[in-house]
Amino acid sequence: MMQFLFTKTPLAYFVAVVVYLIMKDIYKYTTKKSLFYLLFFILNPLLHYYAFEARMYSMMAFLATLLFYAMMKKSYKLYAYTAIAALYTHYFLIVVIAFQVVFILIATHKREWKHFIVPLFKTTLWYIPWVVVLLFARPPVGSSFWIVPSNWKDVLLLPAVILTGFEKDTWMIVPFISSISLIVSAIILFGSIHHVVYQKKIHFFLLLGLALGIPFVIFLLSFFKPVFLPRYLIFASVGMGLLLIVCLESIKNKYVRAALLTTVVSLLLSYSSIQVFMRTKAPVKKTFTTIKNEMGPRDVVYVTHEYDFHPAEYYLPNTKVYIYKKTYEELPWFVGKVLIDKQAVKQFLPVYPDRAFVVNNDGSYVIQSMQ
């Protein structure tokens, strides 16, 4: 139900509410300033892109942000209930919870530990059923994955990658990605020095860990097991936005602060504009709707790429859907192979008068059959 709501309502509404509460309740910014700073999240390319997808990434961003808000407010019951929802949403959120547990143990007094750990322990017991399922399912954790290993050169682009969700191996070309990284790094460096020397607030280091600490650890891990992917770290993008706001507020010269703020917002807007035109997907809904109107009662659908199998079943619920010219063993596990029946793979076309609507990965299709 929650994921349904997220797909019907843009992500910015949900994440923005929690971010607004953090700025108002934790950092005591004025209402006007807090609302203005929401531009960092409404224009965020990564948050905006996945706000309209029926996947778990928008939920990740919301739950991780809520975890940090509950932790900052010391509302540990809220934290515990959010944690169990996070654990059932995406495995990467385990890293967030682990970081927060370590942070509590290192940065707070022992009397605080009990208030935090006890409710968290009680609620996470509800995760045991899923652990049991995993043990019996034996997931192929050691199998090959499509994510490329980390490269040391990429560390210089890490701040921009976290903020925007830039993936260098996609078809998107963003010529100013290095400029984003340079400006963001400069703002964070200045803000970090200011907070270490003058303010020394514990919440700043919590944000620093969310925005840079967790992603950097994952980045290092990806030299051995490639798992670094911006969308898996969508929660860090929210943290990066908050960290930038806090660091910008450290700059006392209002003209310098305004110039940097305008620059960052302009770069985010430019990136988002490029993304709208370049990071597009095949119009599968239009394709399958057209096919549905043309199909006869005995016709079937063949998809040439396994990525299109589940969308075809979704848009054509009463139609037999098959994967064409591949064996079941060739299918990678990360496409939801456990939900694909072994009989759903075909090597040959049906015999006329039966027909197959063969759907290509670009959304085009042809109608074929064997004579």
Image (spheres, rainbow, N blue to C red):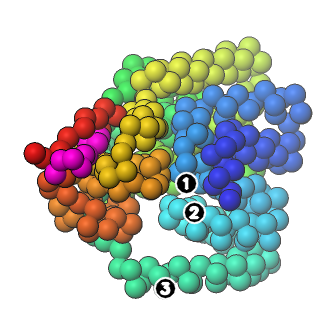
| Residue in the image at 67% along x and 43% along y | 8
Looking at the rendered structure, which numbered label has been put on residue 132? Answer: 3
Residue 156 among magenta residues: no
- Compared to residue 205, the image places residue 244 above or below, namely above
Query: What kind of residue is marked 1?
Result: Met
Q: Is residue 356 visible?
A: yes
Q: In the rendered structure, which amino acid carries the disc numbered 3?
A: Val
Secondary structure type for disc 3 = helix
**Label 3 CA crowd tier, 10 Å (few <14, some 14–19, many 20+):** few
From the viewer's perspective, tell me whether residue 280 is left or right of residue 86.
Answer: left
- Quadrant (top left/top right/bottom left/bottom right) for the C terminus: top left
Q: Position of residue 126 (x, y in %)?
A: 64, 81
Q: Secondary structure at mark 1?
A: loop
- Tag 2 near tag 1, CB within 8 Å: yes
Q: In the rendered structure, which segment of residues is drawn in magenta?
A: 351-359
Side of 282 where 204 appears, left or right: right
Q: Residue at x 50, y 24 (%)?
A: 276
Q: How many other residues sit within 10 Å of disc 1, few (<14), some (14-19) or many (≥20)?
A: some
Q: Nearer the viewer, residue 197 or 341?
A: 341
Task: From the top left corner, tell me how far across and down residue 253 is, in percent.
Answer: 75, 19
Task: Between residue 254 and residue 35, name the one nearer to us.
Answer: 35
Residue on which the image places disc 1: 56
Q: Which residue is mark 2?
A: 89
Query: For the residues marked 2 and 1, what is the alpha-carbon distance in whole angstroms?
Result: 7 Å
Residue pictured at 41% horizontal, 24% vertical: 278
Q: Does 355 appear in magenta?
A: yes
User: For the N terminus, which image quadrant?
Assistant: bottom right
Left or right, 298 with respect to 46, comes to left
